[in-house]
Image (cartoon, rainbow, N blue to C red):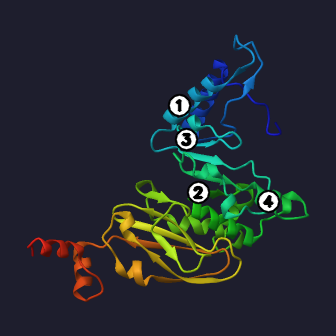
Amino acid sequence: SSYGDYMCEESEGWREFMKQGFAGMMADYGYDGLYYDFVHPIVCYNDRHHPDSPHISTDGMLEMCEWTATQVGPDGVFSGHTGWVPTIACKNYCTIDTIYEEIGDDHVPSLGRMPEQAQFVNARPKRLVDSFLWNSCLGSGEKSSRRPRAEDMQAYTARCALIGVWPTPRTDDLAEAMQQPEDPKANAFVGLYSSLREADLTTMEFADWRTQTAFTSDNAHLRAATFWNADQALVIVANSESAEQQTGTVRIDVTTFGWPENPQLATTGLEVDLSGHDYRVIPLTRATHREQHNRSATGTSVCARCADRRSFGGR
């Protein structure tokens, strides 16, 4: 390929050479993770390292993935770029799965055309390669001098938020800008990470814009995805498909999170005003019994626990 030769991982000598080099780099430079490109089996016709030719490199590739997961450890990162050939067995070893290099559109894909891999067998967090923002969306000009349009980045980021995946900025273009969040080239990417960084998403369940049941809106342009656990939730509301400002009342039924009812959110709702392709993260915290009881005392809601106790003669 244009990135170099494919090496067959059925070659034990090659695998051992890679392991030695990767382990040495981690030890010498203090790396806590590894990134592999082209993490998928290939067909090989070389009979000097395998008696059966042609053969496929599946066994050697999986052995290498297993070694890597052990090498980085439970606190490290194994980022596998499965890209063109989604392989579930590879994803199971990865800490994070990098996909979507195969897109060839000349525009940012609509929400409905975001990759099915993001929802299908979603065993690992996923990042989307966004090379098309540089390669396909920008019209004429030298590739080295191209930069994504701010509106393209904003629309793409809002759509990523609604399907629960993370865009992968191109380091050579954005490394400097990411140190300066006020830079418009980096705002969309940095904003998404910053808005969710205080929450431990590994403790939360997730429902994308298609499958979530907690959120409704009187404006069809406003869609949402939800993260939640027993104590907190994040509702990501996005105006991902419209370049125009959109306003509406959104309602959130927190009982779908297994929480007590919150009539104010479920009935009255919240007013949301979003500019074109913008999004907003609404953090929610589960009300304690005392907070729920105090709201019922002021007539703003009914304390379900107290109501249950009264119905059974309790206090």
The answer to the question of whether label 3 and label 4 lie on touching residues, with beta carbons closer than 8 A, is no
Give the numbered dot on residue 134.
4
The answer to the question of whether label 3 and label 1 lie on touching residues, with beta carbons closer than 8 A, is no
In this rendering, which labeled residue sits more in front, label 2 or label 1? 2
Circle nearer the N terminus (2, 4): 4
* Residue marked by disc 1: 66
In this rendering, which labeled residue sits more in front, label 2 or label 3? 2
Q: Position of residue 3 (x, y in %)?
A: 79, 39
Q: Residue 134 occupies which quadrant of the picture? A: bottom right
* Residue marked by disc 2: 165
The amino acid type found where label 4 is placed reads Trp
Assign a secondary structure to mark 1. Answer: helix
Q: Is residue 174 left or right of residue 195?
A: right
Within 10 Å of disc 4 (Cα), the crowding (few <14, some 14-19, many 20+) is: some
Q: Residue 64 occupies which quadrant of the picture? A: top right
Within 10 Å of disc 2 (Cα), the crowding (few <14, some 14-19, many 20+) is: some
* Residue in front for this viewpoint, 35 or 63: 63
Q: Position of residue 155 (x, y in %)?
A: 69, 69
In this rendering, which labeled residue sits more in front, label 2 or label 4? 2
Instruction: From this view, report whether residue 9 is shown above or below residue 125.
Output: above
Instruction: From this view, report whether residue 79 is shown above or below residue 195.
Output: above
Give the numbered dot on residue 94.
3
What residue is rendered at 60% in x and 58% in y? 166
Cα distance in 3D space between marks 4 and 1: 34 Å
Looking at the image, how many numbered discs can be counted on the residues?
Answer: 4
